[in-house]
Image (spheres, coloured by chain):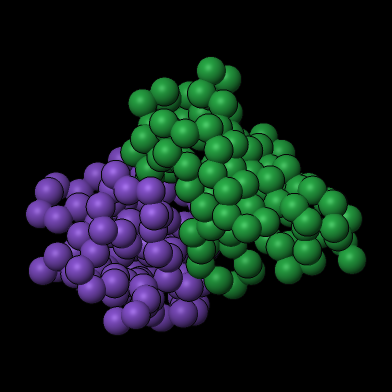
Amino acid sequence: GAGVSQSPSNKVTEKGKDVELRCDPISGHTALYWYRQSLGQGLEFLIYFQGNSAPDKSGLPSDRFSAERTGGSVSTLTIQRTQQEDSAVYLCASSLALRQGAGYTFGSGTRLTVV
Amino acid sequence: DQQVKQNSPSLSVQEGRISILNCDYTNSMFDYFLWYKKYPAEGPTFLISISSIKDKNEDGRFTVFLNKSAKHLSLHIVPSQPGDSAVYFCAANNDMRFGAGTRLTVKP
């Protein structure tokens, strides 16, 4: 598509439930990133995929968080046994390559609320 | 370990004046530095970048300056407009981590 698409745009879930967040990157973009922004906070890096290389998971806050990227395109971020502190806007971005001056293209995010 | 830092959480300027947003970094191996702008309820959008081999890049009202000896970059917006009110993030493209952001408010 023309941009990075994320779904759902909003998600309210009960504490302890699992959630899946989806990201459709721009076609042809080999790099895909997940970030989250908690209320009043900056952008927190979560995970990065580049082509067929092993993902950089160094930003995942706990083992309840995992992500997959199937076929080098769509990515799913899964949060198991959600906690209230997981409430945030989860942002996905894609780019042609990591070492590039044109930056990433971000989606509009998924606002997750854990009640 | 935060390699890109924005130490000013907020900035308020009058319309028509200059806005200066600052960013410091620790890794001298970064190739590109980028600025993003974020409005509420939207994803960040790429604004302007600068290569580490340059010290200035200008695009309309936006200019980014890079001081490699000080490991410091700044974004200048002149003249500032109310529509520039947003959160601005700096980043280095060799590192996926962003600064904490600076909330700019331009008052009419």
**Residue A9 on image: x %, y %:** 46, 80
x 14%, y 47%: residue: A54
Residue A16 in view of the camera? no
Say if A22 sits above or below B26 in the image: below
x 79%, y 48%: residue: B18
**Residue B1 on image: x %, y %:** 45, 29
**Residue A42 on image: x %, y %:** 57, 49
Q: Nearer the viewer, residue B15 or A24?
A: B15
> Horizontal placement of A12 versus B6: left or right?
left
Q: Colour of chain B?
A: green
Q: Nearer the viewer, residue B48 or A65?
A: B48
> Horizontal placement of A4 versus B24: left or right?
left
- The quarter in which the C terminus of chain B is drawn is bottom right
Image-quadrant location for residue B16 = bottom right
Q: Colour of chain A?
A: purple
x 55%, y 38%: residue: B56
Give the total number of marks visible in the rendering: 0
Say if A54 sits above or below A17 in the image: above
Find the residue positioned furthest to the top: B69
Image-quadrant location for residue B5 = top right
Residue B8 in view of the camera? yes
**Residue A16 on image: x %, y %:** 40, 66
x 59%, y 36%: residue: B65
Say if B52 sits above or below B63 in the image: above
